[in-house]
Image: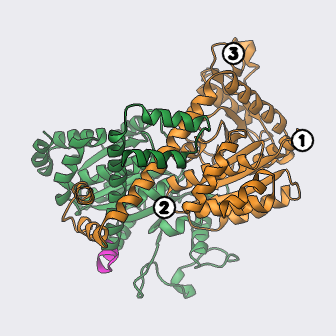
Chain colours: A green, B orange
Amino acid sequence: MQTDLVSPLLAGNRRALARALSQVEDGGSEARALLAALYPHTGRAHVIGVTGAPGTGKSTLVNALAKAYRAAGQTVGIIAVDPTSPFSGGALLGDRVRMRDLAGDPGIFIRSMATRGSLGGLARATADVILVLDAAGFDRILVETVGVGQAEVEIASAAHTTIVVEAPGLGDEVQAIKAGVLEIADLFAVNKADREGADHTVMALQMMQGLAPASAGHHGPRSASGHPEPGAQSDGSWLPPIVKTVATRGEGAEKLRDWIEAHRAHLQATNKLIRRETARAAAALDHILRDALLTALLARLPDGALSVTVEAIARREVDPYTAAARLLANSA
Amino acid sequence: MQTDLVSPLLAGNRRALARALSQVEDGGSEARALLAALYPHTGRAHVIGVTGAPGTGKSTLVNALAKAYRAAGQTVGIIAVDPTSPFSGGALLGDRVRMRDLAGDPGIFIRSMATRGSLGGLARATADVILVLDAAGFDRILVETVGVGQAEVEIASAAHTTIVVEAPGLGDEVQAIKAGVLEIADLFAVNKADREGADHTVMALQMMQGLAPASAGHHGPRSASGHPEPGAQSDGSWLPPIVKTVATRGEGAEKLRDWIEAHRAHLQATNKLIRRETARAAAALDHILRDALLTALLARLPDGALSVTVEAIARREVDPYTAAARLLANSA
C-alpha cells in the first residue's frame, strides 16, 4: 500500500505527501517500508534548524525567512517542533496562526509536531518528517524548535545549518545566552533589533566569540578592530555571523537567507557535509537497532514475564540491572 | 572493589559517598554492581523535582527549601541538573555558588550534573545518583532542572513531588506558563512574590486550573468563590497548591516544605506511590535492556561492519531501516 504513495509523492502530489506524513507519524512496518522506499530520493534539501528562547519571535522569523526563500524561487518545508508542549494541542493552534500568514502558496508546506512519548521519539519522528519533505522535493526545510536545551541540540543535530535566535531584553543575559549555544550555532539572529538593547545583545554574542572586550562600548565594524570577518575563514573554519532582524517587518530576512546559503556553500566546499551525514546515519541506525532489538526480546519473553519483573523492581525485591540480566539470560 | 564502598556508604561515610558517585557517573560494570548492591537499601527518600524557566530564582528557592528541611531536622541531598549546558563547565560554577551558601552543614550534600552525550543518558545518570543518595540515607532529595520542556519532564519523572517555579514579569505569560506544565506540577511556587505582577501570575495559574475566570480582577481567597481548597481532594485527586515565595529572604519556604509533606502523605494514602514506582521501574528496565542488547549486538558484528554500514547510509546507498535489518539478520 505504501508504495502507492511513492510515485505521486515524488511527483509533488500534496495529498500523497499528507498521507505519507500521517503514515510516518503513525510508525510501524508500513512507515518503515515507505521511508526505505523514499530514502534513495533524499539528500537534496538543505535543512535549517532555528532555535531560541520563547519570546524571541522565532516563529515570525521563520515565516519571514520562508518568504525570503520564496522570493528567490525556492520551495520551503516548515517543521515546527515544540518539545515543551508534550500534552496539549498547542501545535495545532500554531499551525493555524502560520497558515493565515503563508496560506495559499503551494511552494510552502507546514507541519507541526508535539511530543508523543519520549524526547528521543520526537527527535526521530522529526528526522523522518524531514526525510519525507526532502523526498517530496522541497529545496529548503526549516525546523523550528523552542529553547536551546539539550532537547533542541538533539533535534538540531538533523540540521545542516543551525540558527540561534536571540532578542534584546529577555531577562538575565548571562542565563539567556548560554555558552553551549556557541557550539551549535552556525548563525545568530538578533531579532526585534529595533528595540532598545539590540546592540548590547550583539556585543554580548561577539564577546562570547572572543571578538569584543568585555569593557568595550558600542561596537563598531569588526574589521576596523582587526577582528576577522564572519563566515568562512581561510583555515577552513566558520565564524558564525550575527544578523540583526525585525521579523515582523521582514527586515534582515534576506540577509539571513544569504548567510544560510553561504554556510551551505562552506559545508559543500569542505568535507563537513559528509561528516554531518555520517553522524546522522550513525544516530539513525543506533535508534532503529535499539528499538528492533527490544521488540524482538519482548516477543521472545513468556507472557507476563515483563510485568512480573517490573513489579519486583518496584517493590525493591530485585535491582533493575540484575533483573535485566536475568531476562536476557532467560530469552537467549 | 565496589562492594568495599557499600557498608561505609550505608553507614553515612561521606568519602565513600563521593567515591560511589564518581563510580556511578563513570558507568560500566562496576557501577552496575554497586547500584545492584545499593538497590535493596533504597526507596526511603522522598524525591522532589524543582523545575522552571531561567530567571525564576529556582536555585535560590532550592537552597531556601533545603534550609527549611534542615530546620525540621531532616537531611537533604541536592542534585542540580542542567540540560541546557551540554558543553560548558557551568555546573561546577553553580556548585561553588551554592557551597558558599550551604557550606559546613553535614546534613546537606550537593551534586551538579551536566549533560554528557544524550539527554536519555542524563536522565538515567540522574536516576542513578538519586539511588545512591537514597541509599546513603538522605531523607529528602531535591532535583533541580532548568526549564519546563520535555527534557525536564523526563528527568522529573524520577520525582515523587514536582514543583514548577514561576516568577512575575518573565516575558510573555502565555508562553511562559505552558499548558503541559499543569500535567506535571504537584505544586506551584510563584517566586519573587514581592515583585509587581505576582498576583497576576498566581491568577494566571488559577485560570489554568479552571479556578478563576479570565475576566476576574484581583484574586480573593478561593474558598470564598466556592472553589475547592488546594491539596488532597475527597475524590482522591490532588489540586496543586500555589505558594508565593521570596526565596532570597527564605519567605514561603516552610509553607512550601509543608505542602510537599502533605503531597507525600497524599501519595502514601492513595496507591499513587506504588504506581509511580512501577513506572520508574519499567523505564529503568527499558533503558538497561536497550543498552545491553545493542552492546551484545555490536560485540557479535565483525570488525568494521558497523562503520561500513553507516557510510553506506550516509551516501544514500541503503536506507537505515534496511541496513538495520541486514545487520540483525547477519548477527542472528
How dense is the environment of label 3, judged by Cα within 10 Å: few (below 14), some, or many (20 and up)? few
Eye-nearest disc, 2 or 1? 1
CB within 8 Å, label 2 to label 1: no
Dot 3 amino acid type? Pro
Q: Which residue is drawn at 41% across and 88% down?
A: A234
Q: Which residue is drawn at 30% across and 50% down?
A: A128
Element marked by disc 1: helix
**Which is more toward the observer, B32 or B138?**
B32
Dot 2 amino acid type? Val
Dot 1 amino acid type? Ala
Q: Which label belongs to residue A33?
A: none
Q: Residue at label 2? A: A164
What range is drawn magenta here?
Answer: A265-273
Mark 3 or mark 1, which has the lower sequence index? Answer: 1
Q: Do labels 3 and 1 share a chain?
A: yes
CB within 8 Å, label 3 to label 2: no
Question: Can residue B33 be found in the magenta stretch?
Answer: no
CB within 8 Å, label 3 to label 1: no
- Which chain letter matches label 3? B
Most common SS among magenta residues: helix
How many angstroms separate mark 3 from mark 1 (CA)?
Answer: 31 Å
Position of the C terminus of chain B by quadrant: bottom left
Determine the residue located farthest toward the top in the rendered image: B226
- Which chain letter matches label 2? A
Please state the total of marks drawn on the protein image. 3
Element marked by disc 3: loop
Please identify the quarter of the rendering in which residue A21 is found.
Answer: top left
Element marked by disc 2: strand
Q: Residue at label 1? A: B71
Q: Which residue is drawn at 63% across and 13% down?
A: B235
